[in-house]
Image (cartoon, grey):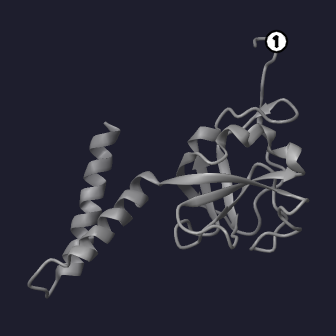
Amino acid sequence: MRPVLTASLALAVIAGASGEALAGSKTAPVGQVGSLVSQARNAVSGWRLQARLYHAGGGGASGRDSLGCTPVPLRTVAVDPRIVPKRSKLFIKETVGMRLPGGGVHDGVWYASDTGGGIKGSKIDLFTGTGRGSMKPAMPHNLKRLTVTRAGSFKGCPPAGRTYAKVDTAKG
């Protein structure tokens, strides 16, 4: 049912927006229609972004992100704000269940609160914490394309005290 709903919603967005774009014009502006299709696809399904990892110390992140907040390990992401709006709460499907230091697993929720000079276009940088060792849980995702969906927005800074689900190690 989701594909039908997704396709219907995308067509409704395209039809409504292209109707406005075409009003008063005798020919279809091909570039506008292509742009509308792209916008509808992003609004419905999110993005496929190439992931990179970054950390504090040793040439990685410094004390504050682009919002002036302290980056939160395994929650803060840096984005190109022309692609993913800053202050977006994101869901990254591939990070769900990622084992974390301390015995928890990731729930897939991240916060777009940072930008960077090397983040242009369809890229996303995942902040892992302090030092190269902090990258270990996320290393399988480095340089891969991730499925990123906007799950809302946030005000202020990303929550630092967010808890992760605990893994029951007795059951394996």
User: Measuring 74% from the left and 52% from the top, which residue is drawn there?
Assistant: 75
User: Measuring 21% from the left and 74% from the top, which residue is drawn there?
Assistant: 30
Q: Secondary structure at mark 1?
A: loop
31 lies left or right of 162? left
The residue lying toward the viewer, choosing from 94 and 162, is 94
49 lies left or right of 136? left
The residue lying toward the viewer, choosing from 95 and 24, is 95
5 lies left or right of 113? left
37 lies left or right of 114? left
Residue 157 image position (x, y, % from top left):
77, 66
User: Measuring 23% from the left and 79% from the top, which residue is drawn there?
Assistant: 20
Give the residue furthest to the top. Answer: 171
Residue 61 image position (x, y, % from top left):
83, 64
Which quarter of the figure has residue 167? top right
Residue 160 image position (x, y, % from top left):
83, 55
Q: Quadrant of the C terminus?
A: top right
Give the residue furthest to the left. Answer: 26
The residue lying toward the viewer, choosing from 85 and 79, is 79
User: Measuring 54% from the left and 54% from the top, which residue is drawn there?
Assistant: 49
In the picture of the structure, the residue carrying the numbered disc 1 is 170
As drawn, 52 above or below 155: above
Q: Quadrant of the N terminus?
A: top left
Q: How many marks?
A: 1
Categorize mark 1 by other alpha carbons within 10 Å: few (<14), some (14-19), many (20+): few
| Residue type (three-letter) at the residue carrying disc 1 | Ala
